[in-house]
Each structure stands twice: as structure tokens, then as C-alpha cells.
Image (tube, rainbow, N blue to C red):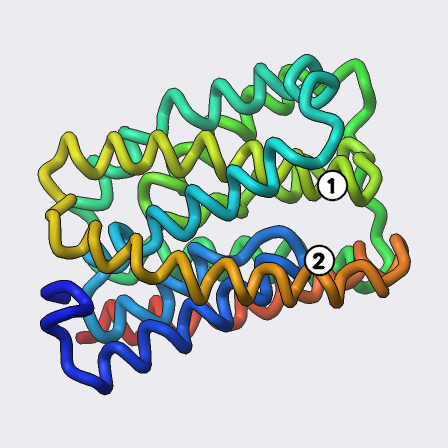
Amino acid sequence: MTGLANASPELILVSITAFLVAGFVKGLVGFGLPTIGLGLMTVFVGVEKAMVLVLWPAFLTNLWQGLLGGHLRALLQRLWPFLSAAVLVLGAGTLVLTRLPVGAADLVLGILMVAYAVPLLAGVVLTIPARLEVPTGVGLGLVNGVFSGLTGSYTVPGVMYLQAIGLPRDQLIQAMGLLFLFSTVALGISLGSFGLVSGRETLASIVLVIPTLLAVWAGQKVRKKVSEAAFRRLVLAAILALGLYLIPIGVWRLVQ
């Protein structure tokens, strides 16, 4: 993409639509913006440029979500081992991205999402006891960091971990925001260090903040009308949908 100002009207329309959809899902369930934005935009501009386009919308929406929930201090005290691990190894995932066949990471990520969501929607309860919260958090944080750098999506297995430790809805939303905020900053630094960030894509990313924020606001309005039990099922349904969305995209990219 050569920047929205120099893009075709069709590409501009596709970009705005993609970030409206991604922003609404983000506002509704607290995640999904990078996954949906990347999945849609990679078809038109390639995965590396799509990751750059997602940076500013992801950063600002996650800043909003992560800092303004009212539980910042408590969540940082509880989650810092997990969050630190997720950020520290993100660059390793970006390094792998530059060498892995396009589509492989999307395929693996999609399969993991489906494998996680289906049993839980069927009634299986996944919990992590308090005594295992820190070591499990570190291990899953490391995995999450690699996947984040590899795919630009911060969901797996981070959201799964935050659900399994039993955070209530408001804390879960803010905790996801913190994970995504720190991961977005680390991803931006990592992409820059590998020479994958250009001025034109960065400018386009800033422009796309406007439709994204409007869509997030609309999604949040809808979320307030949903009960906590329904919200948790909605999160699982969103993970399943994203997984089913990523699998064919991954296969399509691999065969191109």
C-alpha cells in the first residue's frame, strides 16, 4: 500500500471497511482487531504492510482499553510475569516471520483457536489454580509473544490464559488491553528493527485510527447490554469464528 492518499478508491474503501469491522469486534469482545484487520488487508497489501497498517489503530484502542478500566494497579501486580514474558520474546516471532512460508502461522493460529473454543463452548471448564498462575503465565506469555511477532495477533494463548485465571468481565477486558498494548509497542519496535516500517504505511495507519475508534465505541455500547455469562460465551464464539476465519486464509496463502 502506498499510503491512503495515493491508493485507489477501491483500496481505500476496503481499508476503511476492514477497520470498521475489526474495530466493532474489538469494542464488543475486547480483542480481534489485529486478527481481522490483518486477515482482510493481507489479501490486498501483503502481511508485512498489513501489520504496519494495524499498528496505530491497535495502539490507540489498546491504550484506551488497557489504562481506563479502573483496575490498572491490581492487574499489573498480578500479571506482570505474564506480560513481561509476552513482550520479551516478541522479536523472535518477527524474525521467524521473515523466514517462514506465508500463511503457515495463520494456519497454526487458527487451528489452536478452534481447538480451544470448541470444548469450552461444549461445557468444558478450563481453570488455572492460583499456585500455578505465575509459572503457567510465564510459559504461555512466551508462547504468546512468539505468536504475536509471527502473526501480528496477540490473542493466542494470552486471552485463553486470562480467561482461565478467572478474571471477571471488566478486569478481563482491561487485562486484554494491557497485553495488547504492550505487545503492540513491542511489535512496532520489532518491525522497525527489521526494516518493515515505512512512512507511507505509517501515515495510512494513523488515518485508519478514525474509523477504528468509531467502530470500537459502537461495539462497547452493544457490550454493555450483554450479561457476564453471555459475554464469556461471546468471547469463546469470537475466538472460534476467528480461528475458522484464519484456517482457510492460511491455506490460501500457503498455496499462492
In the rendered image, which quarter is residue 190 located in?
Answer: top left
Q: Secondary structure at mark 2?
A: helix
Question: Could you tell whether 69 is left or right of 195 in the image?
Answer: right
Q: Which residue is mark 2?
A: 235
The residue that appears at 35% across and 62% down in the rendered structure is 208
Residue 221 pos. (x, y %): 73, 63
Q: At x 21% / y 85%, what residue is drawn?
A: 9
Quadrant of the frame with the C terminus: bottom left
Q: Position of residue 197 (x, y in %)?
A: 15, 44
Q: Which residue is mark 1?
A: 163
Q: Earlier in the sequence, mark 1 or mark 2?
A: 1
Tell me: 96 left or right of 119.
Answer: left
Judge whether 15 appears above or below 145 on screen: below
The percent coordinates of residue 219 (x first, y second) are: 65, 65
Q: Work out which quarter of the rendered image holds the N terminus and state it.
A: bottom left
- Amino acid marked by disc 1: Gln
